[in-house]
Amino acid sequence: VNEFAINGHENRISYVVGSGHVYRVTAKTGSESAAALAREVQRLLDEFVRTNHWHKRQQEIVRRRDRDGEVFLRLFVGEDGATRVRFVEPSQVATPPRLANDPSASFGVQTEPDDVETVRGYYVDGRFVEAALIQHRKANVDANVKRGLPLFYPVGKNLRRAEKLLRNMSVVAGIQSAIAIIRKHGAGTRSTVQQFVQGQADAAVTSQATGRTSLFQRYAPGTILDAFAGTDYQFPAASIDAARYVVVLQAELRAIASRLVMPEFMLTSDASNANYSSTMVAEGPAVRMFERLQHEMIEDDLELLSRVVRAAVDAGRLPREALSEVDIE
């Protein structure tokens, strides 16, 4: 739960998904029957988007994929051929104890014995679910690795250090600013100092828990202090220098931003040092990355929608020509 990490996640969602994608079904041929079939498939997909709250689900897909390194989408097909999508938590996908010694069933993913990229199914809560009913989107690993890694996994230590540094800076500054005045009595003994403090106090409060009495003195705006010889007044708040720590914090945040392939202001929301021209240049690599992530998500979405159409065909809701005579864009 790190504010900088949350900002990174939200920015990726905003740029990759935005307000949501729009799907259009087109006929491969110019015949009237193909056009009618395209309209029928379009109605099916519009219903899928509406009943599954797909635009919100797209945002959650990006957040889960970045946060967990993977996202599991399970398809439930009704008798009417309509498909409903639900998330499966990564912790639910695990290898049953009876298959602990089977390498092809490791990490809860059942694959071909000689081909780790050909998935047969997944073990969800100990039960086998066919691969056709689950779409597994993983991130930050090679194709022959069964499970994904979180987006911030390589810079987790940087996030923890940045969080700790920011906390310590705030606590120290809070303590320093809370102490308004320090009076130094050059020639005073302990008893004379205590008598002086009691004499200057405007109020005294005794704690019922500890029995100690705290003395308070009110300084109104514009108060003028008169000190006798040997008394020195110091103001700790004047010596606070947070700038030297801010430089270290910014260095940590740049390391995190470099992992995200984002300019620093997209992670910190601080654009005070960025002029228009340098900001446009800094956004260049990020734009390319967002386009690549969008293209990857579009491919995954189209693959899922093709399963939705196939499920409707298998249920008899659509003719079999729907698999070959229309395109989803």
Image (tube, rainbow, N blue to C red):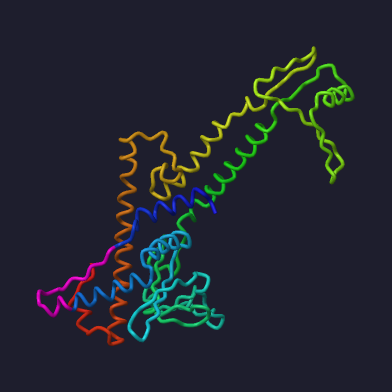
* Depicted 228 relative to depicted 158: above or below: above
* Depicted 82 relative to depicted 9: above or below: below
Rendering coords of residue 14 (x, y %): 37, 54
Going 31% across and 77% down the picture, which residue do you hit? 307
- Among the 4 quarters of the image, the one containing residue 83: bottom left
The residue stretch that appears in magenta: 22-36
Q: Is residue 217 left or right of residue 110?
A: right
Going 79% across and 28% down the picture, which residue do you hit? 202
- Among the 4 quarters of the image, the one containing residue 56: bottom left
Q: Residue 316 in magenta?
A: no
Going 65% across and 23% down the picture, which residue do you hit? 221
Outermost residue toward the right in this view = 191
Q: Is residue 166 left or right of residue 212?
A: left
Residue nearest the viewer, comparing 56 with 302: 56
Q: Residue 28 in magenta?
A: yes
* Depicted 324 relative to depicted 241: above or below: below
Rendering coords of residue 196 (x, y %): 84, 22
Can you say which quadrant of the picture contains the N terminus? bottom right
Q: Is residue 164 left or right of residue 155?
A: right
Going 57% across and 32% down the picture, which residue do you hit? 242
* Depicted 98 relative to depicted 198: above or below: below
Rendering coords of residue 291 (x, y %): 30, 54
Can you say which quadrant of the picture contains the C terminus? bottom left
